[in-house]
Image (cartoon, helix red, strand yellow):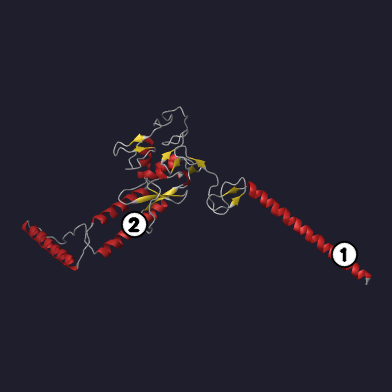
Amino acid sequence: MNLRMADDQFLNQEQQRLREKSLQSDNNMYAQQAQNMAGGVTCPKCGTVNEPDADYCALCGAFLHTGVCPNCGSEIDPDADFCEACHHYIRTDVCSFCGASFSDQDAYCPECGQPRGGIVCPACHTLNDFSFCKQCGRPLTDQARETLEQVRQMPEYKTLVALTQEYDELQMQLPYETVQDKERDDELQELRKRVLTLLAEDTGKTIEVVPTPKRKRVTKEELDESKSRKLDQIAELLNRLAIPEDPSPARVRNYAMAQKPSGVRLAWVCNYKQALHSSPCGCAKPQMGGKWVILGHNSKQEIKDDK
């Protein structure tokens, strides 16, 4: 009996010791967490406290460290070269046109020779910080013109230009508004056929097949369907032409502006924050890559951060 009591007492003491050890371990863990919390970095986007040496939030992925725009005082990423709040190029040590390094004393880039204060477009008279005009898309530097010529030789770009031209022609086409419109058009086509036949007979020729007009009128529904299919083809090709990450923001801006076709409303969606810009010239970190998208196609999102 005394032996059993001794065993029970020993077990109780051992259980108490284990509980105290576990409690001490928990207290140490909580103390370590509290210490980390005290020296950690709070995410400005979601509020999560991250490790002191973390650059990105472990929960939402947002950049944890911010800089300040020297022009307007807005918070910006330290590696951004453009402020999206005041729309100014803010790097003083890197040429915005070619990406070469220069000193604060250089008024012109020692590499490409462009002025620090920007270039006025000779076509639309817009002041630009980058090699392509942000207003009309005109190449403003030798490097921009060389990039444009390289892109024009790409098969994908040639296909893209052809598709946008076809879409532009569809935009100019007038559909049938009523049944009477179609009936009148059919009558005109018959009249045209008879006139061409009579003219051919007068000259002793025979027309086996009367050429049809290049633009055949269709109903509004058919025209809208054709436009939608054409936009889908353009959007698919733009996805294939997406620009990956590149160390040089200037190179990404130049290449993206060179591949932009005319004839359809486009916006630049950046990989930096998935925002829509009128062009990569309005993005703070184009070096993260991005792509052109058709504005308003399969989306109601509009450009919000450009002026």
8 in relation to 129, above or below: below
Q: Visible in this render: residue 78?
A: no
C-alpha gap between disc 2 and disc 1: 81 Å
In the picture, the quarter occupied by the N terminus is: bottom right
Q: Secondary structure at mark 2?
A: helix
Mark 2 residue crowding within 10 angstroms, few (<14) / some (14–19) / many (20+): some
Q: Secondary structure at mark 1?
A: helix
Residue 3 lies, in percent from the top left, at 93, 69
Between residues 99 and 205, which one lies in front from this camera angle? 99
183 in relation to 48, above or below: below
Residue 219 lies, in percent from the top left, at 24, 64
Residue sitting at x 27%, y 65% = 221
Between residues 264 and 196, which one lies in front from this camera angle? 264
Residue sitting at x 76%, y 56% = 24
Type of amino acid under label 1: Phe
Q: Residue furthest bottom?
A: 1
Residue 233: mark in rendering: none
Type of amino acid under label 2: Leu
Between residues 271 and 214, which one lies in front from this camera angle? 271
Dot 2 or dot 1, earlier in sequence: 1
61 in relation to 66, above or below: below
Residue 231: mark in rendering: 2
Residue 10: mark in rendering: 1
Figure quadrant of residue 228: bottom left
Mark 1 residue crowding within 10 angstroms, few (<14) / some (14–19) / many (20+): few
Question: In the shown orientation, is residue 287 left or right of residue 279?
Answer: right
Residue 266 lies, in percent from the top left, at 35, 51
